Amino acid sequence: MPEPPTGQGGDIATVAYQDAHQHHDSAYYEQPLAYDEPMHYGNPTASCGPECAPSRCEMLLNAFSNLACLNDCAPSPALNICQAPVMIGGGFGGSGRTNLRGTQIVSGTSFVATGTGTIPVNQANSSLLYDVAGNVANPDFASILTGTLGGDGRYTFQVVESIGGTNLGLPPNTVFLNATATEQVGGGIVNGELWDISVNGLQTFNIVIPDAANAGAAVVGRSKIATNNSAMPRTRTFFNYDLMNNVPLNDAGVSVNRFTPGFEYAFGRNDGASIEFRVPFASTLSSDVIANGQTQTGDVEFGDLFLAYKQVLYQSTDVVFSGGVSLTLPSTNDLNVQMADGSTALLVENQAIHLMPYFASIVNLTERMFYQGFIQVDIDVTGNHVVTNSGMESRLRDTTRLYSDGALGYFLRRRGEKPDAIFNAIIPTIEMHYERQLQRGNTLSDGIFVLGTPNADYQSNFNMVFGSTFEVCNNEAISVGYAVPMGDGTDQMFDGQLRAVWNRYF
C-alpha cells in the first residue's frame, strides 16, 4: 500500500494523483519519493507481472491470490485518501443496563421474648407463648409443630405471630415467611426463661443492573472496528481516551473514563493487509454490583480483548474498499449481582466470544473532501453462563447487532501547505454512528425470577461526532471529538462523550 496518511517520507500516490488528475499543486511536488518499488500510474490494463496469473478468471478460483493481485495492480490511491485520518469513533457499545426481578429471603429484627406454656415430659411437644418485652400485644408469638433439640442442649421451635401487627423489622416489599424461637440457655425448657426470636421474610426486588447478556463489556463498553480506525491498513501504535457522562449502568447513571491502548501492523504486498490488537479498560461501575446498595463507581475494570484482521479488496485513484473480521475474547470479570445482605442474586460468567465481520471504504469526493465508512455485524457465538439465587442455570446469548458508521472529512490544511506551522495538517470531520439490535433482547425466567424486559422493543441509538485531526508531524496525529446523542433519549447511552485519540505511524 502507499504511505499511511500520517506516515514518514514521501508518497507514491503523489505521482499517481498528478498523472490521473493533471493536478499541479506545488505542495504535492515538495514530497520526495520514498519507495523503491515500481510505481503504478492508474492504468487498469497494467500487467500484473509474473506473480499473478494472466487470466483473471483463473485467479478467481483462489480468493487470496486474487486479492493480492488486485491490490498490487490497481491504481494507487490519491494523496488525500492516503493522508486521510482515522475515524474518531463514538459510542459506549452494548445495551447499558437491564432489569432483574426476583425474590430473596431476608431477615427482620431479632427479638428477645419470655416463653411460657405447657411443658410435657417430652419437651419437644411443648406448646409455648412468647412475650416480647415492652410490646402491648401479649403474647406476640406462639410455637407451632414439634421443637428440635440442638447439639448445644437448646430447643428451637417454629413460631408464628399470635396477634398480627407486630413490627417484624422486615424491609419494604417483603412478606412474612417464617420465624424461630431458640432458648438462650440449654438444659431443658423452663417457664419464664428467655428465648431469641428470629424473623425471616420473602422480599420481591426489581432492580437495574448492567446488561447481563453483555457481561464481558457490561461496565466497560464494547469495542467495534470503526473506533479510531481507517479503511486502509496501517502500521501504528495508538491510545484512545473516552469520558462518557451518565452512562445508564444503574438507576442513577455512571461516569465512565475508558482507556484503550493498542497497535495495528500492516503486512503483505504493498501493506495490503493488517492485524490489530486492543486492550480496553475503564474507571467505571464495579462488576460486583450491590443491589439497593452503594456499588463502587470508580473501580478499574478491564474489558474484553479485541483482535481484528483487515484486507484491501479493491483500490483505485479515488476509492479504497477493504473488509475483514474482528472478534472479542472474554478477559474481563464476571458480573456478580449481590443483595444488600451479601447474598448473590445473579452470577453471569463471562464466556462470550463475539465474531464481527465488517466492510470499510474510503472515497475521494473532491480534491480536499473525502468520505470514510464502516458497516459491521456483531454476533455472540457462545453466550454467557448464568446462575441465579433461585437455582436456575442457563446460557444467555447477546442479541446480534448492526453497526453503521460514516464520516465526512475536509483538508482545511494539507501537509506541506504551511511548512512552519505548528500542525502539518488540520482535518475537521463530522461523523455519524448508528447501532441497532437485529433481534429482541433475550429474557430468562423461571416463573419467579426474570432477567431482562419481556417483549422489549429493538434497541437502537444514533450519535454524531464533531471533531478534528491535527498532524503534529508526518507520522504523528492527535484527534479530538465530542459525541452528541440524537433521538428521544430512551436508548441513549450517555449525555455526552469526549474522545481524544493519539496515533503514531511507522
Image (cartoon, grey):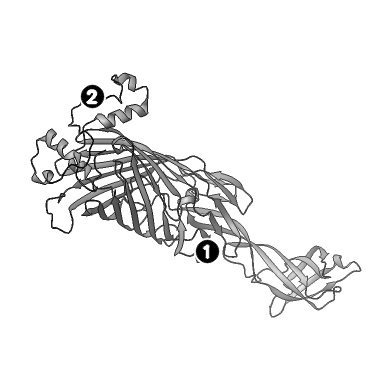
- Residue extending furthest toward the front: 36
- Residue in the image at 31% along x and 21% along y: 53
Query: What's the CA distance linking mark 2 and mark 1?
Result: 70 Å
Using residue 4 as the reference point, say whether residue 194 is left or right of it. Answer: right
Using residue 458 as the reference point, say whether residue 56 is left or right of it. Answer: left
Question: In the rendering, which numbered label is found on residue 292?
Answer: 1
Query: Picture coordinates of residue 490 (x, y %)?
Result: 37, 52
Query: Picture coordinates of residue 20 (x, y %)?
Result: 13, 33
- Residue in the image at 36% along x and 27% along y: 63
- Residue in the image at 39% along x and 60% along y: 256
Task: Name the foreground residue: 339 vs 72.
Answer: 72
- Residue in the image at 12% along x and 37% along y: 18
Q: Is residue 191 visible?
A: yes
Task: Name the foreground residue: 417 vs 47.
Answer: 47
Q: Residues within 10 Å of mark 2 (few under 14, many from 20)?
A: few
Task: Name the foreground residue: 45 vs 52.
Answer: 52
| Amino acid type, residue under disc 1 in the picture | Asn
Query: Picture coordinates of residue 70 (x, y %)?
Result: 28, 29
Question: In the rendering, which numbered label is found on residue 92?
Answer: none
Q: Give the quarter of the image for residue 457.
A: top left
Picture layout, residue 94 above or below residue 171 = above
Identify the residue under disc 2.
47
Q: Is residue 471 visible?
A: no
| Amino acid type, residue under disc 2 in the picture | Ser
Q: Give the quarter of the image for residue 126.
A: bottom right
